[in-house]
Amino acid sequence: MKPDLVVDVGNTRIKWGRCEKGAIRELASLPHDDPAAWQAQLAAWQLSGPRAWAVSGVVPKRRDQLIDWLRTQGQQVCLLDRAVQLPLQVGVPAPDRVGIDRLLNAVAANHRLQRSRKPGSHGKPAVIVDAGTAVTVDLLSPEGAFVGGAIFPGRRLMSLALHQHTALLPLVQNTQGNPPPVGEDTTAAIVAGVHHAVAGGINQLLKWQLGSRYPRVNYPTAPAIFLTGGDAPLLQHSIDDRARLWPEMTLEGIRLAAEAQP
C-alpha cells in the first residue's frame, strides 16, 4: 500500500503527513476530537475524494475515533497497531507490549541507516530519542533490531507533577530551550530544573546504552543518534551534539510500514 496520508495519534496532538513520490512532503499538527479541524486541514491541502491513509498511535480511543471519521468520509484506512505488521526485528520478549510509536521510529531509523551504509560495510548501533509527553530513549543493535530502552516523564509532565503534588509551586509552561541552570525565582528554577533533568536523563542514558552495550572500541564508526518529538527542538542544544533532529520520524516509519503491507 502506498499511502497518500500518514497519521500518528499521540498523547497530546494528532500529526498528519501528506505523502508524495515516496516521501512526506507536508506536516500538520491537529487537536484530538475536532472533526472540523481535520476537515479544514484536508481543504488546506486541497485533498478531495477517497485517499489511502495509514494510521497508528498510542491512544487507541482517539485513534479509533479518527479512523471512524475517515471511513465515514469514504477513505481507505490501514491501521498499524501490531509489531508483526512492521518490517522490523524486535528483540524483546513481548513485542506487542512495546509502544507502537517506538517501533515505528525504529523502522524509520533502520531505513535511513541502510540507505546511508556503504556496500560491504558493517552496521552500527543507533539510539532514538523521542521527547514528547513521555521521553523514550531506545536502542537499536548494529543489525537493526529493536532491543529495548527507557521511558520517563517529559518536560510537561514533570512541570505538571510539581504543580499537582506540592502546595505552592505554580504550573509553568516551559517553552525555553537550554535555559540557565540557576533560576533566580521560583518559575525560573522550575524551568531550569525540569529542562536539565530531562536533558541530563537523555545524556546519561545515551552514555550507558552505547557505552555498556556497544563500546566504541568495537564499533569505530560513530553511532547514530536520532531526535524526534514535540520537545525535540527545545532539547537539541542540551544533549549529545551527534543527535540529528528528525521531526517527521514516526510518520516516516508509518509510511514505510504501510508500504511493506501485502
Image (cartoon, helix red, strand yellow):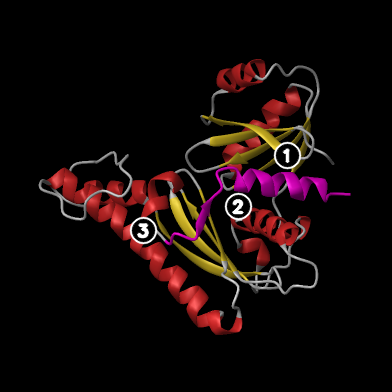
Please rate how many residues cluster around mark 3, counting C-alpha atoms within 10 Å: few if below 14, some from 14 to 19, many from 20. many
Please rate how many residues cluster around mark 1, counting C-alpha atoms within 10 Å: few if below 14, some from 14 to 19, many from 20. few
Instruction: Kindly identify which numbered label has been placed on residue 23.
Output: 1
Residue lying furthest right = 262
Q: Which residue is nearer to you in this view: 187 or 181? A: 181
Q: CA distance from mark 2 to mark 3?
A: 21 Å
Contact flag, marks 2 and 3 (Cβ < 8 Å) = no
Instruction: Kindly identify which numbered label has been placed on residue 101.
Output: 2
**Residue range of the region highlighted in magenta in the rendering:** 240-262
Residue underneath mark 3: 199
Contact flag, marks 3 and 1 (Cβ < 8 Å) = no
Amino acid type at image mark 1 = Ala
Amino acid type at image mark 2 = Asp
- x, y percent for residue 71: 75, 28
Residue lying furthest bottom = 217
Contact flag, marks 2 and 1 (Cβ < 8 Å) = no
Q: Residue 243 colored magenta?
A: yes
